[in-house]
Amino acid sequence: MTTSTGSATVSSPQQPLLNESEALPVSLPAPPPLSPLRGNPAVFGLPTVIAGAFGLGLVDTGWLPPAAAGAALPIILTSAAVGLLVAAIWAAALGQNPLASLFAVFFGFYGSYAAFGLGLGHNWYNIPATQITRTTELWLISWLVTLVLVTVATLRLPSSFTLLLGFADGALLLLLLGTINTSTALTHAGGYLVFGFTAVAAYLYLAVMSAETGGKGLPLGKPVISG
């Protein structure tokens, strides 16, 4: 603002729109807290799947006598079940819901297998000896139905995931038929399919680790259903 006095021009400072006491407070949003959960939970969950499945495969193919069928329980109860629970929570915290679902399902499978084997071996559930076979069929049918449903849900994921679940479905079906028909051959065939499941899980682990260590990763296949 200027005023003229004779030939002189005097400049007056511009008045602020607000007095200092009237200034509006400026509030900046606080930065979001850093989550301690980062990274890829698959690098943690997949090895535990592999260890548990390989142990199951050895048991089901007759590498051990029937009296030692519980030999894989220490691996399944500690490495597989606990590891998959941690991986499922980790994936869910990162918002990786499909991966969290897969890890949670396999945690339930391994955890219930350990509870099943330990419970029958120590008679925790007071199941009559005449109903052991029927109880085993119940467990196999329940998980076969569940894993078939999960297999259908993976059709929009890379096809290697569908193949992984397909091996699990086939193994459970053969184990169920072997239990119903008291067929060692069918049980052993189911065990070999467990090894197929293990091989696909190992491939997925190598793919993940290749990507995480700066490589290009490995192809996981196109989804069965796209779009």
Image (cartoon, rainbow, N blue to C red):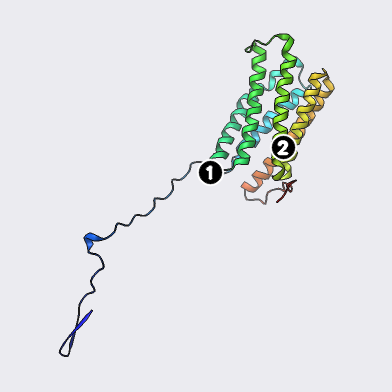
In this orientation, which residue lies closer to the viewer: 96 or 138? 138
Sort mark 1 into few (<14), some (14-19) or many (20+) by Cα contacts within 10 Å: few
Residue 126's disc number: none
The answer to whether residue 111 is seen in the rendering is yes
Q: Where is residue 179, by image quadrant? A: top right
Secondary structure of the residue carrying tag 2 is helix
What amino acid is labelled 1 in the image? Answer: Arg
- The residue singled out by tag 2 in the image is 151
Q: Where is residue 44, by image quadrant? A: top right
Q: What residue appears at the point 72 percent right and 38 percent down from the top-left corner?
A: 152
Seen in the picture, residue 105 relative to 179 is either above or below; the reply is below
- The residue singled out by tag 1 in the image is 38
Residue 107 shown left or right of residue 188 in the figure = left
Secondary structure of the residue carrying tag 1 is loop
Q: What residue appears at the point 71 percent right and 32 percent down from the top-left corner?
A: 147
- Residue 23, given in percent of the width and then of the height, sits at 26, 60
What amino acid is labelled 2 in the image? Answer: Thr
